[in-house]
Image (cartoon, coloured by chain):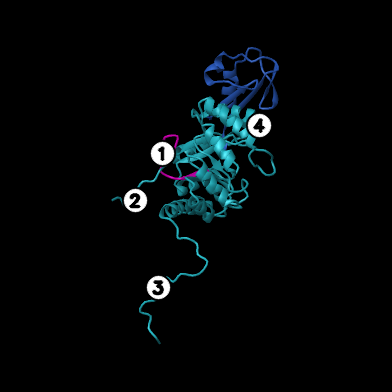
Amino acid sequence: MTSTTTRPDPLTIAGESFESRLILGTGGAPSLDVVERTIVASGTNLVTVALRRVEASLGGALVGVLDRCGVRLLPNTAGCMTAREAVLTAQLAREAFGTSWIKLEVIGDEHTLLPDPVDLVEAAERLVADGFTVLPYTNDDPITARRLADAGCAAVMPLGSPIGSGLGIRNPHNIELIRAAVAVPVILDAGIGTASDAALAMELGCDGVLLASAVTRARDPERMALAMRHAVTAGRLAAGAGRIPRRWHAKASTQADGMPHL
Amino acid sequence: MTITVNGKPTGLTAGTTLAALVSSTVEGHRYVAVAHNGAVAPRGTWPDVTLADGDTVEILVPVAGG
């Protein structure tokens, strides 16, 4: 029998396996050096990138860093607010990166950055029909998640709380309902503030965690990346181990038999 | 002729191809995506696209993002 501590436990999306269940976003890092150190510390195999006008980029250095780390790129449609814009951005990303994988984001407004579920489902349907492997960032709503899975998405990625808020998982029950509602992987995406949030996501049954700000904007990003790596692993192990039931009253862990009369 | 490149009016000599414009703009970038008049322009078509007055072009490259 293989030991629990050494048994491979990859995250499999659309038939491709990743050793790490942590997907890292690079947004918000103060420098490319920090990007590189956090990727290494996190142990991630999959890193998100965005497309922007060439004048707004830091030259080609980012790609060099990602190459050196040996990670796979997951382009996103960050900032898109309509299905039309998101579909076009995904098609541009496929041209640029030569991958049909896309983290689909369709944002409803700039204050909450919450997904627009109507345009999100429409964009997902169009991209699946166009041959994309679609990983949609979605609300913590089991019905929308089911619609996305039914549309042929390769995973669903519900938020814990708004992007960059660090508020953690505001509706753990809904995350559990999403896990039960779809057969594809569930990746908790957005809102993670610290390691315990990432562990909770995994304990709730998520297959992976995608986070950026919690690491890139931490006081010590490299150390937080390492914390997230351990948190995701710990949460996954705990979920598989089966937690004890919650009880109203205490239950002694030491037997009463043989207690002396003193 | 004047075309709009990444939102800025840009004067170009008549007959300029998309390939020429892109290569003069994105030196040092391996991953590049181009939208021409609101549609994806696949890399293989760039040498064959001759830009026209009033065209819009978006030239995009990777940046860090969540």
* Snapshot quadrant of residue A258: bottom left
| Coordinates of residue A98 in the picture (x, y in percent) | 49, 27
| Coordinates of residue B56 in the picture (x, y in percent) | 67, 21
Front residue of A209 and A128: A128
> For this view, does A5 lie left or right of residue B56?
left
Residue B21 visible from this viewpoint: yes
Mark 3 or 2 closer to N-term?
2
In this rendering, is residue A82 above or below A207? above
Residue A254 is marked as: 3
Mark 1 or 4 closer to N-term?
1
Front residue of A262 and A100: A262
**Residue, disc 4:** A82
Q: Report the chain holding disc 1.
A: A
How far apart marks 1 and 4 lie (CA) works out to 31 Å
Magenta-highlighted residues: A13-24
Label 2: element kind: loop
Amino acid carrying label 3: it is Thr
Q: Residue at x 57, y 29 (%)?
A: A125
Front residue of A119 and B8: A119
**A62 in magenta:** no
Residue A6 is marked as: 2
- Tag 3 near tag 2, CB within 8 Å: no
Mark 1 or 2 closer to N-term?
2
- Tag 3 near tag 4, CB within 8 Å: no
